[in-house]
Amino acid sequence: MKFSRGLRFGIICLGLISLEMQLSSVCCAQLPTGWKAHDWDRQRPQVVTPGLSNLPLAPPSDAVVLFNGKNLDEWRAVDGGPAKWIIKDEVMESVPGSGYVFTAKSFGDVQLHVEWAAPAQVQGKSQGRGNSGVFLQGLFEVQVLDSFDNVTYADGQAGAVYGQYPPLVNASRKPGEWQAYDIIYRKPAFQDDGKLLQPARITVLHNGVLVQDNVRPLGPTSWIQHGTYQKIAEKLPLSFQDHGNPVRYRNVWLRELPAETITQPDKPYDPVIVALTPEQQAKIVGKYNRNSGGLWEISQKDNKLLFSMIAAPLEMIPHSKEEFGLKYTAGKLTLTYDESGNPSELQFYMGGEIMKATRAK
Ligand code: MG
């Protein structure tokens, strides 16, 4: 096929425009966070000096203790055999080249407490200095790094969800000093067909300072680019990273968290709701002298009765002309009527207490 000179020029121009559009779409690709992983120019978090150390922080009564300085019984090597890290002075230490260590038990949602220390003797720089990591469900890394006066990319420093979310601030202690991570981890949720329903969520306090606030990892941690969500078991071991530096750990414990379900009371609060006539309501409206001092008041608005103590009026839910619940508060009001059918006494039950008042004249 032969094209005229002008048409050939036009085709070349269109080709160049198309190439430029392709290049521009490539050059502007970025993560949903707005950043590409490991951008050296990404602003590094402000340094915050943590308060005085309260470590070691003893585990609460319902904790699963993963390391208490005695042995590595709760830990395994990647092949399922005995963990190859060592214990020195009741502290477990990463042995360069020995591989990650994994918990023998598996976990889902957890509150995790980890104490760690980068080597006191500073060696290396950037990612080569005191590097390890806490991998939640073995998948999502909260970076462990000596980030005290050590420049690295923002999403790779201590407290980062590695490669995705830099810490909000740099709350690092000096190398050799014990530091703490307190991590709240919620596992990802999947549909039966494997489709992601909800990403994992991670909150981290570093030395008592918030550094990750319920962030949603974009996928499992990987070095250069994060992975994609694949349906996983409800519970998986968590792991610590061997990154070639002798990082130390102690006092590791977690609390397994219940699923985020909303509980309901066993029986409905107001099984019977009646409508009082305007005349019945009018009799109830008025002031009541509290026996221990003070004044209560029942008023009427929009065909509703409102009970006022000291705060905002509470809407009364009539169960009968004698018995009332409250719309949003687990309290109960009981009215007693005199022989002529007018309220004479008001009792208010709440929080295990009974308070009484008599009708003001
Ligand atoms: Mg690491």
Image (cartoon, rainbow, N blue to C red):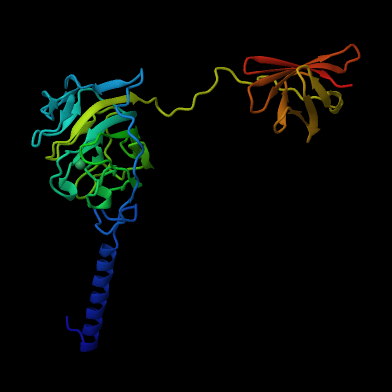
Question: Is the N terminus in the top left, top right, bottom left or bottom right quadrant?
Answer: bottom left
Q: List the single residue furthest toward the bottom.
A: 5
Q: Residue 57 occupies which quadrant of the picture?
A: top left
Q: Is residue 314 left or right of residue 277?
A: left
Relative placement, left or right, of 319 versus 52 is: right
| Residue at the extreme right of the image, as rendered | 340
Image point 35% across, 18% down: which residue?
62
> Residue 18, percent across and down?
26, 72
Q: How many numbered marks appear?
A: 0
Q: Is residue 223 shown left or right of residue 197?
A: left
> Regarding ligand 1, which quadrant of the image does it lie in?
top left
Residue drawn at 71 percent across, 22 percent down: 273
On the image, the x and y values in percent for residue 276 come to 80, 24
Quadrant for the C terminus, please: top right
Looking at the image, can residue 63 be seen? yes
| Above or below for 85 versus 41 | above
Name the residue nearer the viewer: 353 or 116.
116
Q: Position of residue 147 (x, y in %)?
A: 24, 46
Task: Kindly give the residue lying farthest to the top in the view shown.
Answer: 339
Above/below status of 219 relative to 61: below
Residue at 33% across / 51% down in the picture? 45
Residue at (27%, 29%) from the top-left corner?
233
Estimate the x, y position of residue 182 in percent, counting from the top left.
Answer: 33, 33
